[in-house]
Image (tube, helix red, strand yellow):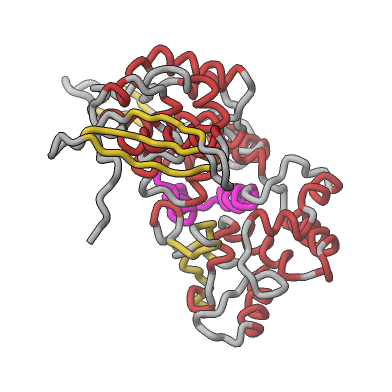
Amino acid sequence: MAKAQLPPLGVKVSGDIEHRPGGPNPHRARVRWFDPRSGRRLSRSEMLPTSDDAEDWIKRMRRLAARGITPDTATMTLAEYGAEDSEVWPLAMRGLEAKTLDPYRAGWRLRVVPTLGHIGVAGVTNGIVDRAVHSWIADGHSRSTVKNSLAVLVRVMEQAVRDGLIDVNPARVVGWQQQYKQAEDELDDPRSLALRNWADLQRLSSALVARSAGEYIGWGDAVEFSACTAARIGEVSGVRVRDIDTDSWLWTVCRQTTPGPGGLIDKGTKGKRRRVAPIIPEIRPMLSRRIAAAGRRPDARIFTGPRGGRITTAVLRDATHWDAVVLSLGYEFLRRHDLRHTGLTWMADAGVPLHVLRKIAGHGSLTTTQRYLHPDMRAVERAGRSLSGYLGGSGSGTDPAGPKVVPRRVPGGHLRSVP
């Protein structure tokens, strides 16, 4: 049988500290409350080494009880209500993965509490949240940092709505993203983040291998595979032998490696969307070699670290001295995720139709895929020559007088010349 919570939920708790000399724990912390069923006055106590420890224990007992609409809860500050050792925190953060919870926790500690923590829960308004977000942006925090800080505030305030402390969540503000005005190049021109050609990719691959411990060739193989299939590093780490069809040379992208509770885990791809990516001839010999090295076992990983471990973008960065290598090659803009931008940009320039490119990329929005279709200067020049040829001014065999004009009968029996 589950042990009853003491103090019970929703009761008002009083506390006191008594100093009793002698022994390692001379401070007795005590909390008292009226039992909601019997009406009797009950108490709970704990012997602690210091008065600060005793005060913290009493505060913890108060937070444990403050779950209903009581004077204690109603007058709580935001910092007290959403404290990480309170019962509110795990309720507000339920369902989050470890890799998401960590930046949320940092946002709460470093931005929400210093900016808004002193305000009572019921005193947090839309205007106050607007000003807080504006101050975070003015301090130079990135878009993702502000997003994580606002997201954790939204969750805590949503719990306050469920507790009945407030009627509407004031943290659900919109429009703050517009203040960045293209702060991230990737949002508007991912093409600018791509490598230029196959030779640049091979140069990068070789340099990363040369800087790694033991010159492990697997790092270069993973980088080339990522760029040529427009895949994320986590997806490269997740590929198994059974995912590769060596008859049609197609890869079924169905999992990725990502941080999770207790370490790295394999899970579905982003957006839970399976997709198929082509494997070009340039990397097929490398892939065949790695499949053979894996013993052709269906569940064997094709790309691993030198000790057989799973690859992440952080592992790749540290093992290859990525930042120093890309700087030495003149690619100081290049991140691991830009290998994906490289593959999608190359496919777009190769003429892959938009709807096909979207399927290969696994994009949920067609607008996202369209960002890779910005024509380069050669495409613009070809468009100009094509138009000139159509109009007959390029000597390409068309009528120099321009498009032919043919008569067409229009209503009323009259003839009108139309091209």
Q: Is residue 91 above or below residue 164?
A: below
Question: Is 373 placed left or right of 272 in the picture?
Answer: right
In which quarter of the view is residue 109 placed?
A: top right
Out of 5 and 33, give the one closest to the viewer.
33
Give the quadrant of the C terminus: top left
Question: Is 381 placed left or right of 68 in the picture?
Answer: right
Q: Which residues are magenta?
A: 338-364
Query: Is residue 317 at all visible to an observer of this figure?
Result: yes
| Prevailing secondary structure class for the magenta stretch in the rendered image | helix
Question: Is 153 placed left or right of 3 in the picture?
Answer: right
Taking the spot 24% from the left edge, 31% from the top edge, the residue there is 68
Q: Is residue 321 above or below residue 163?
A: below
Give the quadrant of the N terminus: bottom left
Instruction: Specify whether residue 242 is painted magenta.
Output: no
Out of 396 and 373, give the one closest to the viewer.
373
Image coordinates of residue 154 in percent, x first then y, are: 38, 30
In which quarter of the view is residue 320 placed?
A: bottom right
Image coordinates of residue 267 in percent, x first then y, are: 45, 62
In which quarter of the view is residue 44 placed?
A: top left
Q: Is residue 336 above or below residue 166?
A: below
Query: Is residue 389 at all visible to an observer of this figure?
Result: no
Instruction: Specify whether residue 359 is painted magenta.
Output: yes
Question: Is 339 placed left or right of 324 in the picture?
Answer: left
Image coordinates of residue 219 in percent, x first then y, are: 72, 65
Image coordinates of residue 42 in percent, x first then y, are: 26, 38
Taking the spot 67% from the left edge, 36% from the top edge, the residue there is 377
- The residue sitting at the left extreme is 37
Please count the marks in the image.
Answer: 0
